[in-house]
Image (spheres, rainbow, N blue to C red):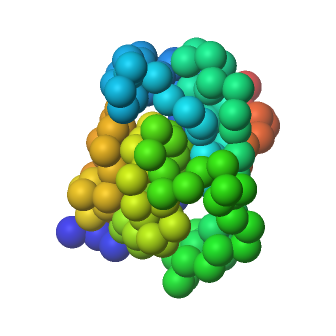
């Protein structure tokens, strides 16, 4: 058994794949809101949840979109979650009828903080790891706990040397 660095067991997500997966999340959520099946608002967890939240809001025709900013990573190291910006709580209330969207649930600590602010919100992520799954109501793809997901906003296209030869 070898000790792998976080980037060595990577799951690379392109913009196209993220778009497809966020649309699949929207389809899964469509008609599943309280009462009439609709959702009142979307709250994106910044920064990773902003792109999928925008796609979900567009697909479900939700015009009220806000953010909650929680810092829980310093580059690739997870730390104690800290709320930097809260959504408009007069509008969001206890979260009834509100979709909270993030790119990924890892350990679930960030979502524990979100649930304290919006206990009745429906939390949806595009990707989920086993340790954080209990904090999520809906997700699309599960990856192993030791997989590092490379999102398109973290990547750049560049030339790569071939494994053999330079011809």
Depth check, front residue: 93 or 57 = 93
Q: Residue at x 21, y 69 (%)?
A: 1
In the image, residue 161 sits, relative to residue 67, either above or below, namely above
Residue 11: percent from the left, percent from the top? 45, 43
Question: Which of 61 and 44 lies nearest the eye of the viewer?
Answer: 61
Residue 134 vertical position relative to residue 26 in the rendered view, above or below: below
- For residue 84, side relative to residue 77 (left or right): right
**Residue name at image x 69 percent, y 65 percent:** 86
- Please indicate, yes or no, whether residue 47 appears anywhere in the rendered image: no
Question: Measured from the top left, where is residue 100 in percent x and y?
Answer: 51, 46
Q: Quadrant of residue 68?
A: bottom right
Q: Is residue 108 left or right of residue 153?
A: left
Q: Locate the C terminus by quadrant.
A: top right
Farthest-out residue, left: 1
Please tell me which residue is depicted at 57% across the width and 26% down the height of the picture. 56
Residue 80, above or below 103: below
User: Residue 29 at what x, y percent from top left?
Assistant: 39, 25
Q: Is residue 135 visible?
A: yes
Q: Position of residue 28 (x, y in %)?
A: 36, 22
């Amino acid at each position: 058994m070898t000790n792998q660095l976080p980037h060595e067991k990577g799951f690379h997500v392109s913009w196209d794949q993220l778009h497809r997966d966020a649309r699949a999340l929207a389809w899964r959520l469509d008609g599943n809101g309280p009462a009439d099946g609709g959702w009142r608002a979307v709250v994106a967890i910044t920064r990773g949840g902003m792109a999928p939240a925008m796609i979900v809001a567009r697909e479900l025709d939700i015009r009220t979109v806000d953010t909650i900013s929680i810092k829980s990573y310093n580059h690739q190291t997870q730390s104690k979650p800290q709320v930097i910006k809260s959504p408009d709580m007069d509008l969001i209330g206890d979260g009834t009828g509100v979709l909270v969207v993030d790119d990924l649930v890892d350990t679930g600590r960030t979502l524990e903080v979100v649930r304290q602010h919006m206990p009745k919100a429906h939390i949806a992520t595009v990707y989920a790891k086993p340790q954080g799954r209990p904090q999520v109501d809906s997700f699309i793809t599960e990856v192993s706990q030791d997989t590092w997901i490379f999102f398109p906003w973290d990547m750049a296209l560049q030339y790569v040397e071939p494994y053999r030869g330079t011809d």
